[in-house]
Structures are given as structure tokens and as C-alpha cells.
Image (tube, grey):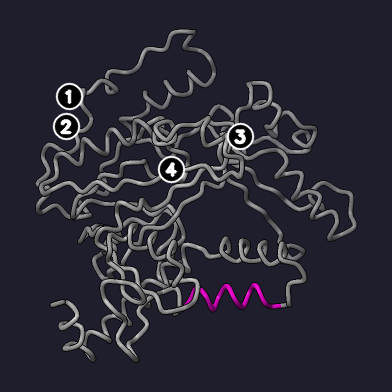
Amino acid sequence: MLLKTKLIVWDEAPMTHVYAFLAVDRLLQDLTKCKEPFWGKVILLGGDFRQVLPVILRGSRTLTVASSLKKHALWLKFRKLYLTKNMRALESERDFGAWLLDIGEKKSGSTIQLPLQCYPSIQDPIHQLYSDIDFSSVTPQELKVRAILTVNNERSMEINNKVLEFMPGNETVYTAVDMIINEDPQDQLTFSEEFLNSLTPTGLPPYELKLKIDCIIMLLRNLAPSKGLCNGTRLIITKLQQNIIQAKSIDGTETFLIPRIPLIPSKTNMPFKFKQDLPLSNLRNAWFQHDGASPHKVSSVQQYIRGAFQQQVIGYGGCVECPPRSPDLNTLDSFLWGYIKQRVYATPPKTLQELRNRIADACASVSPAMLYTMCSGMCSLVSRCVLLLKDTILSMTDR
């Protein structure tokens, strides 16, 4: 496909690191054994260097400028064409467009005076955008044209919480457990739990997530791409439960269940590995089901399980015995153990340490999308069991 391509269009080129251009240049040269830049193909770049340059994490001004294509010898190979007419701006916005260009050309001096239209009569953006909305009957179409841009995540959460106060209904607060993944116990002592709770790394929700029914949420993980549940997907909350959020698509055609899952940010600037997990205090409405396997009969294991789940245990040593031939309604036996066993014993492990490493790697390979599919399948299984074994389940509930 690349060899047959006649023209490559690259938009927002000034925001792209120069290494990306060099990689494409090297790829085309390797494919064709030709030393001409980009194998002589036409490369059309679009963008404005007066806007945002490539973002360099913790980089200085020198590193940011050096990462720009304009500072590389490859830039000399391009022919520059300048656009002189702003086709997007309306006639009433010509002055504002000219003012922006003056800033980019440093014609405004060291002090920049904002135009009068940047000073609304109402200085509170939340009141300005949402004071005329009846949230009890608002539609997604009314909200999609209203947005507030912020500089950082901290300010964004402040605005979200204030907008949430405008909405009717009771507020539900979900708390997490923030921890450090490190074998060195000294790190656990160095960074207190309060400090970890104050952090909000990129790609993670805050320690306290405040939600209401009918508010709009956005996914931060690819839960089920085949069903449209991807990073950035927006949903409307329809029901809030202890460990599951029920939400519908913006157009209202589909309903989804969003479970609570452990989250580990992929990239942080912290000197430790950060993880958000489900707090045990939220297990007061959950039941633990297990069979009579030998490891489950150890007194210390039984004591820990009964304490963590506040005596809500089904099975050996629990307050509710598991009836004979009862359906196994737990996701561990229906999916997880089989999946991990298949990966661990694909070939026989030679040492105990290798077995441990394989188990750890297999557990780490369980993705949020797999957890979502597993929970959805379990909900369907429970629904079928309720229909087929209604009397048995009701008798257990009475106990």
C-alpha cells in the first residue's frame, strides 16, 4: 500500500516529534532501497508553528524546540506554502483572527490585552452555561454544545463537582484504595495513604468519585471495543450500585454494566508503581462462595474470608452451606482458573520460581475488557438460574 501511495497528507505536523518523520523517511527508504527523502513521494504537511509544539515530558524549552521538525535538516527538503486567508473565520471574527496572528508574530509586545469578547458579563462559567438548564429533563443534544476547557485535571474535577451540585438527586461517592506495588516494605512507609489519595495520575479517576443518576461519564479504559465501550466513550448513568454502574449510550439504544476494576496507570512521573483497587469496606453487600477444596479448609483462610466478607460466606465453614448440585455462580470457577491454568501449564514449569512467575504473568494478562465480558456473562448466568431455580433461591434468601 505504501509503495502504491502517490500522496501522504500529514496534518498538525508542528505538534509531531521529529523522530516520527525520520521513522517514516527511514521506512520508505528501506522498502525501496532508495536514498531520496521519503523515496521521492509527495508529503503534504499542514499546521502552524505558532501553535503547540511537540510535548516533551519534563522537558525544558531547549528540548521542546529541538524536537520540532523545523530544527532538523529534513525541514530544508520541504517547499513552504503560506496560506493568507482564514477560511474558517466568519466576517465578524476577522479582527479576533488578526489579533491571534499578532500574538503569534510577537507584535503584541510583552503584555497581551484580551479582546472585550473574552470578558463575559457573567464571570462564573458554570452559571453561564448551566443555569438555564433543567437537569431533570435535559437531553444529550442540549449538553453536547456546552463545554468548559481547563488547564489541568484538578481544576476539571472541581468544575465537575460544582456542575454535579446543579443536578437533582442524591450523590453517590465511590472511594478507592490507593497503594504502591513494590516488594520493598520501606516504600509503603515512605509514602503515606493520605499522600497517595491526593494523587490523580493521568488515566485514573480521583480517590473520591462523585456521581449522580443521569450525569454523563467517560470511560478511561477499553472495556469492550466490539460493543463500543472504548477509552473516551461517553455514557449516561441510569443506576448506581455498590460495585457496578449501569449506564446507557448517549443515544439511549443500549445499556451496559460497568464493574469496578483495579487500575494501574501506564505512564507516571512518580518514583513508584501506583495502583487503585477496590476497598474491602465495599464488600459489605457482597457474598463469597467457595467449595470444600483443601486450601479453603485451613482455619486461617476461613477466618480471613469470614472477616473480610462480614460472615457472608456460602460454602464450607460459611453461614450458608452450598446445596448439593447447586450451580457454581462465581466468576473464578467459570473463567479465571481455567484461563490461568491454560497459560501457566502450556508447557510444564521446571522450577517453583518459574511456576510463581507464570502465575503472576497470567494474572497480569487479565485485561479490563476480559473482566467486563466475564461479569456480563455471569449476570446472564445468574438471571437464568433465578428463572429456573426461583423457589430454591427464595428459600436461601429467607434463611
Local crowd size for mark 3, using a 10 Å CA cut-off: few (<14), some (14–19), many (≥20): some
Rendered residue at 47%/43% (across/down)? 179
Residue with the mark numbered 2: 127
**Percent position of residue 289, x then y:** 35, 73
Does 298 appear above or below 115? below
The amino acid type of the residue labelled 2 equals His
Quadrant in the rendering for residue 86: top left
Residue with the mark numbered 4: 178
Q: Which one is closest to the eye, mark 4 or mark 1?
A: 4
Residue with the mark numbered 1: 122
Relative horizontal placement of residue 384, taking residue 136 as reference (left or right)? right
The amino acid type of the residue labelled 4 equals Asp
Can residue 384 be seen here?
yes
The amino acid type of the residue labelled 1 equals Ile
The reply to whether callout 2 and callout 1 are in contact (CB within 8 Å) is: yes
**Percent position of residue 91, x then y:** 33, 32
Q: Which one is closest to the eye, mark 4 or mark 3?
A: 4
Relative horizontal placement of residue 215, taking residue 152 as reference (left or right)? left
> Could you say which is closer to the camera, residue 168 or residue 363?
363
* Mark nearer the N terminus (4 vs 3): 3
Between the C-alphas of marks 2 and 1, the distance is 8 Å
Between the C-alphas of marks 4 and 2, the distance is 34 Å
> Could you say which is closer to the camera, residue 265 or residue 31?
265
Which portion, as a residue range, is magenta? 335-346
User: Which mark is drawn over residue 385?
Assistant: none
The quarter in which the C terminus is drawn is bottom left
Residue with the mark numbered 3: 54
**Percent position of residue 251, x then y:** 26, 64
* Mark nearer the N terminus (3 vs 1): 3
